[in-house]
Amino acid sequence: MTEDLGGRYTVTLDLDGVTGKADLMDRVARALALPDWFGRNWDALADSLSDHTVWPEGAGEQGLLIVVRGWRPYADARPEEWRTAEEVFAEAADRTPALTVLLALGGTS
């Protein structure tokens, strides 16, 4: 789902039902329409989040806001993986001022 929110290109990353890293990578790849060559590993995720040339069309000019929802069950089930995902999101946002990753706190989905 995409929309214009506050002048940024917004993508909802819905993690409802995600049970592991492979599921997470698939969801990110779909939500951001990443290229087929996306490596589906932590380094590839960090690189893709930091590289506006692989973001959805229009996001590079507006900035990208990723709203992550439904993440708590995954975080509870796989806390080490989730910590790594959070670190990747945070580092990419720190390196790329046009990127914001927001963890939705309401509900589980």
Image (cartoon, grey):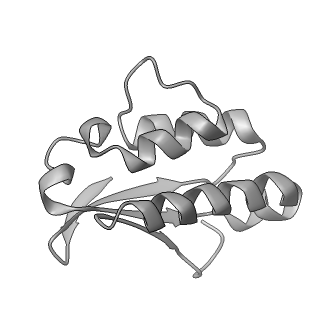
Between 91 and 36, the residue placed more toward the observer is 91
> Going by the picture, which residue comes out furthest to the bottom?
106
Q: Quadrant of residue 77?
A: bottom right
Q: How many marks?
A: 0
Q: Looking at this rendering, what residue extends furthest in the front direction?
A: 95
* Residue at (56% x, 66% y) in the render: 90
Left or right side of 63 for 84: right
Seen at 29% across and 42% down, the residue is: 55
Quarter of the figure that contains the C terminus = bottom right
Picture coordinates of residue 108, whole percent (x, y): 66, 70
Q: Eyeballing the image, is 7 above or below 29?
A: below
Give the residue at x 86% y 56%. 80
Give coordinates of residue 104: x percent, y percent.
53, 75
Residue 78 placement, left or right of 108: right
Please say if 11 is above or below 31: below
Q: Residue at x 23, y 62 (%)?
A: 63
Residue 9 image point, x, y percent: 22, 60
Q: In the rendered view, does 56 fall on the left or right side of 80? A: left
- The answer to whether 10 appears left or right of 106 in the picture is left
Instruction: Tell me where residue 8 appears, x and y as whole percent.
Output: 21, 67
